Amino acid sequence: MDILSLFVVIPVLTITAILLLKDTRQVRMVSAFGMGLQLLMAGTLVFLYLIARHAGNSDEMLFVKDYLWFKSLNIHYAVGVDGISVAMITLTSLVVFAGIFASWEVEYLRKEFFISLILLATGVFGFFISIDLFTMFLFYELAVIPMYLLIGIWGTGPKEYSAMKLTLMLMGGSALLLVGLLGIYFNSSPDGSRLTFNILEISKVVIPLPAQRIFFPLTFVGFGVLGALFPFHTWSPDGHASAPTAVSMLHAGVLMKLGGYGAFRVAIFLMPEAAHELSWIFIILTSISVIYGAFGAIAQKDLKYINAYSSVSHCGLVLFAVLMMNQTAMNGAIIQMISHGLMTALFFALIGMIYGRTHTRMIYEMGGLMKVIPFLSVCYVIAGLASLGLPGLSGFVAEMTIFVGAFQHHELFYRIVTILVVSSIVITAVYILRVVAILLLGPTTNDHFEHLPDAKWFEKISVVTLIGSVAAIGLAPFCLSTMIGTSLHPIIERIIALKPF
Amino acid sequence: MNLGTFLIMRQELLLIIAALLVLIAEIFWNPDKKRSISLFSIILLGVVTIIGFLHSHVGSLFGGMYISSGTTVIMKNILNIGALLVFIQSATWLNKEENSEKISEYFLLLISTLIGMNFMISAGHFLIFYIGIELATIPIAALAAFDRYRNKSAEAGIKLILSSALSSGVLLYGLSMIYGTTGTLYFSEVAKLFGNTSLQTLGFIFFFAGMAFKISIVPFHLWTADVYEGSPVNITSYLSVISKGAAVFILMIILFTVFPVIIGTWQKTIFVTSVLTMTIGNLFAIRQQNLKRFLAFSSISQAGYILLGLIGGNQLGMASVIYYILVYIFSNLGAFGVVTAISNATGKENIDDYNGLYQTNPKLSLIMTLALFSLAGIPPVAGFFGKFFLFTAAAQKGFYLLVFIAVLNTIISLFYYLLVVKAMFISKSDNPIDKFKSDFPTRFALGICVAGIVVTGFASIIFEAIRNLSFGV
């Protein structure tokens, strides 16, 4: 059994184990054990990957395994990772692990909840390890349906509406993506050899430009819907707000990164010529996402909506950076994916914990919580500082790299959009600090909240894991950055081979 | 012609023997044990199905009027599997008081339609084709009116027979024009002589219209909802899956072998009808409350997707259509199976009655969910693979716009399938359907459907085997 397929097998085994359990109290332990194992595996993978690279292995993808699945269509179950995938897998395992502990007190249909959650995680892991487009798409769609059940059954507020809207819009993205993938497949051998779904093989071929001009927008928008590209982001605020805590963590933290990763790995990597030509349209859209998301967050009064719009803004920044198509910006994009993933998971976990105590998410109904629940409040402040890009935490590293990379373009258009997007830092600071002030600082406004319990052990595990990772990346980003940078080389070569600037 | 060549018709002969055995059995059967005629018929069809998978000789009989090839053999086997599942699912309903007098008639009529479909698929001459179609349709109309004490059932029967008769008339008119312009009814010879003249195009259109009725393509679908709602549930499932599947098979064979000359014409026709069918089927399904009507409109839109496999005229297209019918059999019979089980136990057929079903009957809810996801095309169940291959086949010949419209329709269909999932899992109810345990045949049939839904996708050998037996224009 190859190491990569274990990332899909372990969650499936965990689900099977949960199905067979009779006692619901053990469900949580089994889930925690399974996902803890997954986290260890991710750590091992990072270790093995770094060793292999150090030993001089310079293949594009490592730990590759390839099984022929459908002979007539040349569909394979092909897996492989490079530095970027390894980083994303680590992110996912951290967020899922934290999410299991954040859902420790789910009572209603507990078994089904954890099964759906881990099924969702399976889809995400499978997506990151696949290098065959069909397998990738299969795992991508697999991740959508558990979302409907998770939000619809265990959510709050207008949950049926939010769940349906989210599912239909994400399926809409998959629909566009399917057409794009079929277009790529049928154009994957202009010289008449076998058609293929394998990403590495397709990247060696130049897909005819007219086909690229049609299929690049389809593929990019298909992934962009998940990555909160304006104007397809509207599923996000309602979806995140109605979802239960762990689901929001997983969704904003990991699933939205599927969109960014896919946009970069499939749309831009395989169709760079069209990407160069058409990037300006999408750069405008992503800039709007960043700024609009940030302004949107200022106007919100519900904690989850604030964070949801903040996620739209930060994920828009990922797509913005990816479209810049140079080494620095793309490096920044990947770091931003990981940094924001951890950060937003942290935010949602904290919001869930605060909600569990105060039973309200409206910021004006709470106040002065710093005195009442100091541990959670301090963690919230740290998360906020990471979000607005304070040096020493991961947000700064990511955003700095992105802006430097974006500014490397000399044309006026790029300079202007970069300046506009940089202004989002200020707007982010506004809404973050405003929430901190109203929610945490000052006198307590509501007498009912005078005696709330502080974080329990499982909540502390959840939160400390994430803060630790955020701080680690902020203080010592070079390990991550080098790992990503090496893997970006072949991609950048492919992209800039056509248009030196 | 000696015995060896006569045995090329093995499947039809076995089915005729089975039909006769069922007919005669009633005379000799102990009247108290009438109910075990069901078991007898199921075993007979099971034996025929198994023999169908054994090696068979291919060739043609009666001067080319009857053709058996690898393709027709696999098509007949798939239809046998579906018919067998319907038989098993019917056992519970047939044991009821009002039906136990007519058990052998039920099976006799169903086997007759199966014989008709087999002849239809193996046709090499338009006359055998027409005889097959009629034999496949008329007994079903009698079966649609099986429930003597329900007005809707009689209404369904009348609607079905009258509209079938009209469509058969139209079909025959088209065939007469084809005969008039080519002078022959043999498939191979018509293929050589067919051309683009106005009269021949008109003949083709009438032929297509007659077939479109059988497949419930818009705008020939108006009989579907009322007939599906009025008929007994098992007949509805048979109509939606087996009748439709057989008609699709023979339409595909005829389009690919007899009319390849006018491929431009029928590609345009299929493009328009496919878009109309998918869209109208989906839009009407959203408003349905009765589950049988709901599944009827869902079946109409599924026919639209199947047309995507036909439009390219390629080998991949034929393989994906045959594969999709197999997947569709498991999915639709799974969904209908759950509807039947609940209808037999409680008589309730509305989506609102299913509120909170997960609390009381979790396994049934899960089976229904799996079946609906397969119909919607969500991974990892077989429906995803089926839809993907259909779209790939259409894309292979450059019909990207059609694929785009089809995937948009998939999203609309997901909406209404999720409405049922929402009712079962999310909506709370004060008096949900009580917990009940279905009897063995129902559970067995549902088990086979679930196994089919889950396995058929991942086991690539099934698709590859079907593809090796397919051919293109």
Image (spheres, rainbow, N blue to C red):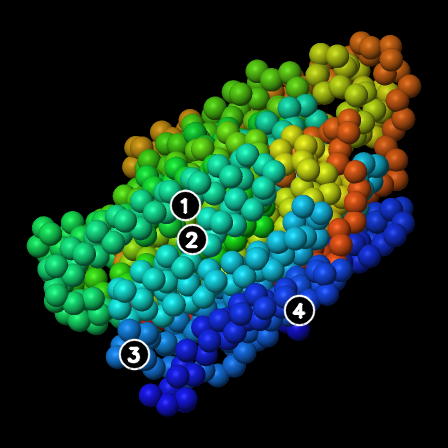
Q: Nearer the viewer, residue A264 or B56?
A: B56
- Residue identifier under label 3: B62
Marks 3 and 1, the one that precedes in the sequence = 3
Numbered circle sitting on residue B138: 2
Badge 4 marks a residue whose secondary structure is: helix
Going by the numbered disc 3, the residue's amino acid type is Phe
Residue beneath the point at 39% across and 84% down: B6
Q: Whole-Å distance between the Cαs marked 2 and 1?
A: 7 Å
Instruction: Report the chain holding disc 1.
Output: B
Relative to A164, A363 lies left or right = right
Going by the numbered disc 2, the residue's amino acid type is Ile
Relative to A112, A199 lies left or right = left
Marks 2 and 1, the one that precedes in the sequence = 2
- Residue identifier under label 1: B161
Residue beneath the point at 26% across and 48% down: B170
- Residue identifier under label 4: B28
Q: Nearer the viewer, mark 2 or mark 4?
A: 4
Q: Nearer the viewer, residue A500 or A18?
A: A18
